[in-house]
Amino acid sequence: MSSPSPSDYEGPLFLGLDLSTQQLKAVLVAEDASVVHESSVHFDSDLPHYGTTNGAVRGPAPGEVTSPVRMWLEAIDLVMTRVRAAGVDLSAIRAVSGAGQQHGSVYWSEEGEGLLTNLDPARPLGEEGHLAPRAFSLSRAPIWQDSSNTAECRALERLAGDAQALADQTGSRAYERFTGPQIMRIRRVYADAYARTSRISLVSSWIASIFLGGVAPIEISDASGMNTMDVLTCKWSDALLEACGGPELRSKLGPEPVRGGTNLGPVSSWWVKRWGFSPDCIVAPFTGDNPATIVSFSQPGDALLSLGTSTTLLLSIPPSSNAPARFTNSHLLTHPTDPPHAFIAMLCYKNGALAREHVRDAHSDRSWDTYNTQVRNTPPGCDGRMGFYFPLPEIIPPGVQGDHFFSYSTKDGSASEHQTTQLALEDVPRDAHARLILESQLLSIRSRIDAIMPAGGPPLQRLIVTGGASGNPAIRQAAADILGLRAYVARSAQGAGMGGALLARWAWWRVEGGYTGEHDGSFEEMRMAYAEEGDVVEVAAPKKDVTKKYEALVAPYRACEAAIVANCAKLAN
Ligand SMILES: Nc1ncnc2c1ncn2[C@@H]1O[C@H](COP(=O)(O)OP(=O)(O)O)[C@@H](O)[C@H]1O
Ligand SMILES: O=C(CO)[C@@H](O)[C@H](O)COP(=O)(O)O
């Protein structure tokens, strides 16, 4: 039986958008959360005239990584064209929400808000002169891969006391990609543009603004990726705002961060006139892509492994009377649907998909099929070798770069007695790299996961895998074996877009139900009202003996990682 066409659906629809690193994705769900349609726009291949590589532009300054704002505008035009061409009735959309890659920032010029309020229905968003370039004081938005501001990070930590004090207050020590230290550098390096900036949006609140026809407030969970919000009170810190952007930053960021599920107002008349949206369609706050992924399918006892451009490990921390510990190599984010008492613990790696592609292209004939065969034909543990691949400066451990190889031995499989020796590339068989990179990436998570587990919370039971690489069976099996958990995937690999659609439905459900108080009509109540259970299928089970073998590799892994950190530090000095 063929699946129904989107035009066959009757009843309310909810639109979730995910503006991530390499693509803009749209997910439409019906009231029962079934997926009606998915479309996407891939920046490099669909919009090649912007000259991006993997959605971004590197340089000109060392460490700078940006994306053209006009490319994102054109992507919105194109994704909507695709959604409509698929037969979706846009007038049936009752609410819009979504997600953006975290930390990236967009700088609105003084003219920007006026232009946004008066969009011309005869013109697409991305047309030259409609919004861009005049609406923006910087034509390219710094994104999460930018690492040009290490000096600013250290300065912010000094101001807070030290790295731990900043982590205690904001949930994270200062990271290059976090928006506060990014703004701090923009203010220093592009002082004129900063002075001409009237408002600053996160990628998430920027896309909400495009729907709203006015600059949207920043959502609290995404705000916890900025180093400027108190993660317990969910309020901006005046001292941190001032340190990052001077006394004017508070007004540039707008009001205090808002909670998800809030009705921000109807879509602007541009959406009604150009695309036939209902004038009653509401806009709800957009969040970060990782928090949105948590919204779409996490329950206590789940570890969520997002294999997008970045690799992120997410744990939902249920409300508890004690605030969870904050560490200086992981993040604590405010929970998008259950703040301020629930949280997300997160590990984030920059060298995720792009590093695996680097290995595939160098050693696997540029083919995922070859790569998967090599993974299957190489034994767990790679015959006593470890391989690390950091084409970009890494987040965990900070700043390491390049490819590094080691041999290791464990005495009787014991974790405490091991030896590691550095190897050259020539010492590593070509077919081993495909498994080597999976083992080092996943052992890094394995070696850190216990530290970020919530005290007294349920033990981990399931590994939910999402993002572009989650369809790869060899990667899913390696994740299940190394983390020792059964792996599951959801009905949509677009976890963040799906989470966005559910956030849209939540805001609409609250309006329909007459919930006006901040704490009335919770996300959980909505789920119960729809009698919904997470819809995931098991795709890999860990093999006990293999998991045991990997447990014994955590100690040699740590020794190799420490050697890389020391070598890279030596090279930097
Ligand atoms: N079959 C596959 N095996 C492994 N990785 C894959 C496969 N298909 C896609 N990917 C990876 O998925 C990545 C994109 O994931 P996606 O979640 O769409 O990224 P983002 O949300 O960051 O834009 C690509 O860079 C690619 O490496
Ligand atoms: O920086 C982070 C999280 O802190 C990244 O996870 C970005 O949010 C980008 O996400 P993807 O495009 O890889 O999904």
Image (cartoon, rainbow, N blue to C red):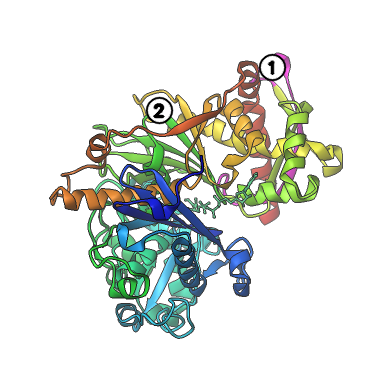
Q: Nearer the viewer, mark 1 or mark 2?
A: 2
Residue at left offset 17%, top offset 45%: 519
Q: Decide which of 133, 156 is in the foreground and name it.
A: 133
On the image, the x and y values in percent for residue 188 come to 46, 74
Give, as a three-letter code, the residue at label 2: Gly
On the image, the x and y values in percent for residue 501 come to 36, 51
Marks 1/2: CA–CA distance: 29 Å
Q: Can you identify the residue that label 2 sits on?
A: 301
Q: Decide which of 349, 272 is in the foreground and name it.
A: 272
Crowd tier of the residue under label 2, counting other residues whose Cα lies within 10 Å: few below 14, some 14–19, many 20 or above? some
Residue at left offset 57%, top offset 67%: 64
Q: Can you identify the residue that label 1 sits on?
A: 413
Q: Farthest residue in the top direction?
A: 412
Q: Which residues are magenta?
A: 395-417
Q: What element does badge 2 sit on?
A: loop
Q: Would you say residue 158 is visible in this rendering?
A: yes
Q: Would you say residue 166 is visible in this rendering?
A: no
Q: Decide which of 240, 391 is in the foreground and name it.
A: 391
Say if the magenta span includes residue 541. Answer: no
